[in-house]
């Protein structure tokens, strides 16, 4: 038997009047919420900018919107995007890696020299990737154990790596025998109509997104970049996280070096010269904050795509090489300025809300 006091019945009656049954959510409301979420994503603005740039080049040139050109552009910026994935993780922790160009050249040269001497392909490729991981470990130890600033530590390994490349080659390229067709396929082959480097870029983008967004160490990376001292007090292994991101970054740079050697069928001593600049620019254009703690892998890849499409478009439009450098520099400055403006705007909104 249900026995309730008059007070309970009064409350029940009031709830019945004040809490009507929820009406089913309409398709329009759902679409509006989905659109708001989409436009709120950091990558959305970058994607819109990429689509606008592509539409402009499609109208102004006849060659841009062709299958061959689009896949050629994707193949060209895929190496930048692959290394930008690792660079993004480094920048998220508040660091920087200037040695990626030298690592690309040194790892590719190591694999090329071993293949030239008839070493089995798996061994040669693992050796090249191992060289990259070793350089990343050295970078991480110099920063976490010795206490060097990331800029100084990686600038030093940049010079050391480039010097080793010239010492080993004496300035001459190392040719890879054509017997290693599986290796050549890595840089020149296709899966259906898609170049293999583009497929590798897409797979690494998915893996990097999952790693940063859905794993413990991914959350640690953001925490270390947001506030290292707070992360340390919370029990996060800050030094181990920094070691991890530098090793990952250099390993991805080594992978890009192997793909480049496979594409050219030779290891060039000048490979990767200045490569660190477009890699860092791709991460920044993609929304990664140089202060750390903000950024995504997808944003970095889209940033690399914008740079690749922009470069291709300027070539198709007949813009001079010198002007191309000026335009690229302008895009980088505007991207950083936009990032700073957005941060200040969000800070003002938070202060206004109290």
Image (spheres, rainbow, N blue to C red):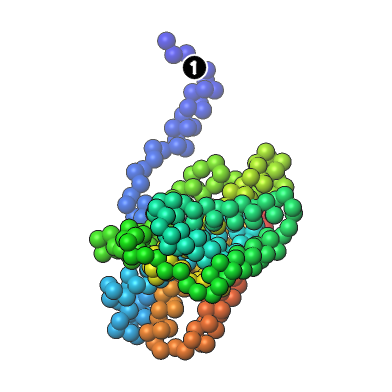
Q: Is residue 126 visible?
A: yes
Viewer-side residue, 231 vs 266 = 266
Question: Which residue, as the protein is rendered here, is positioned at the far right?
Answer: 147
Task: Using the rendered view, name the quadrant where residue 344 is placed.
Answer: bottom right
Task: Using the rendered view, name the quadrant where residue 350 is placed.
Answer: bottom right
Q: Is residue 215 left or right of residue 143?
A: left
Question: Which residue, as the protein is rendered here, is positioned at the far front?
Answer: 117
Task: Using the rendered view, name the quadrant where residue 32 is placed.
Answer: bottom left
Viewer-side residue, 24 vs 74 = 74
Residue at the image position 41 percent from the left and 75 percent from the top: 309
Residue at the image position 49 percent from the left and 86 percent from the top: 321
Q: Which residue is mark 1?
A: 4
Q: Residues within 10 Å of mark 1 (few under 14, many from 20)?
A: few
Q: Is residue 289 left or right of residue 54?
A: right
Q: Residue 145, percent across and down?
A: 72, 49
Question: Which residue, as the protein is rendered here, is positioned at the far top?
Answer: 1
Residue at the image position 49 percent from the left and 44 percent from the top: 214
Q: Residue 74, percent across and down?
A: 37, 68
Image height of 317 relative to 81, above or below = below
Q: Quadrant of the C terminus?
A: bottom right
Q: Residue 89, percent across and down?
A: 56, 55
Q: Residue 152, percent across and down?
A: 70, 64
Residue at the image position 32 percent from the left and 58 percent from the top: 182
Q: Is residue 92 visible?
A: no
């Amino acid at each position: 038997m249900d026995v309730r006091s008059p007070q309970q019945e009064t409350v029940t009656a009031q709830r019945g009047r004040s809490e009507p049954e929820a009406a089913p959510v309409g398709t329009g409301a759902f679409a509006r919420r989905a659109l708001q979420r989409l436009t709120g994503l950091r990558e959305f603005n970058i994607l819109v900018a990429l689509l606008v740039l592509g539409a402009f080049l499609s109208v102004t040139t006849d060659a841009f919107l062709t299958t061959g050109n689009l896949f050629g552009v994707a193949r060209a910026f895929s190496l930048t995007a692959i290394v930008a994935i690792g660079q993004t993780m480094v920048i998220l922790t508040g660091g920087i890696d200037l040695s990626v160009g030298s690592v690309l050249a040194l790892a590719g040269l190591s694999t090329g020299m071993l293949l030239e001497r008839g070493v089995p392909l798996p061994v040669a490729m693992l050796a090249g990737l191992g060289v990259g991981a070793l350089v990343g470990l050295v970078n991480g130890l110099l920063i976490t154990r010795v206490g060097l600033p990331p800029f100084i530590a990686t600038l030093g390994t940049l010079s050391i790596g480039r010097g080793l490349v010239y010492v080993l080659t004496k300035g001459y390229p190392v040719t890879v025998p054509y017997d290693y067709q599986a290796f050549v396929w890595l840089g020149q082959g296709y899966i259906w109509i898609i170049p293999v480097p583009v497929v590798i870029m897409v797979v690494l983008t998915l893996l990097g997104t999952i790693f940063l967004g859905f794993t413990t160490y991914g959350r640690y990376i953001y925490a270390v970049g947001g506030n290292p001292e707070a992360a340390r007090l919370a029990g996060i292994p800050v030094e181990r996280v920094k070691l991890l991101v530098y090793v990952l970054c250099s390993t991805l740079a080594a992978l890009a070096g192997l793909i480049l050697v496979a594409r050219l069928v030779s290891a060039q001593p000048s490979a990767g010269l200045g490569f660190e600049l477009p890699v860092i620019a791709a991460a920044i254009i993609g929304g990664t904050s140089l202060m750390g703690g903000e950024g995504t892998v997808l944003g970095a890849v889209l940033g690399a795509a914008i740079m690749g499409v922009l470069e291709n478009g300027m070539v198709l439009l007949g813009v001079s090489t010198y002007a191309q450098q000026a335009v690229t520099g302008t895009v980088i400055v505007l991207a950083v300025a936009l990032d700073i403006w957005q941060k200040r705007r969000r800070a003002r909104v938070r202060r206004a809300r109290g």
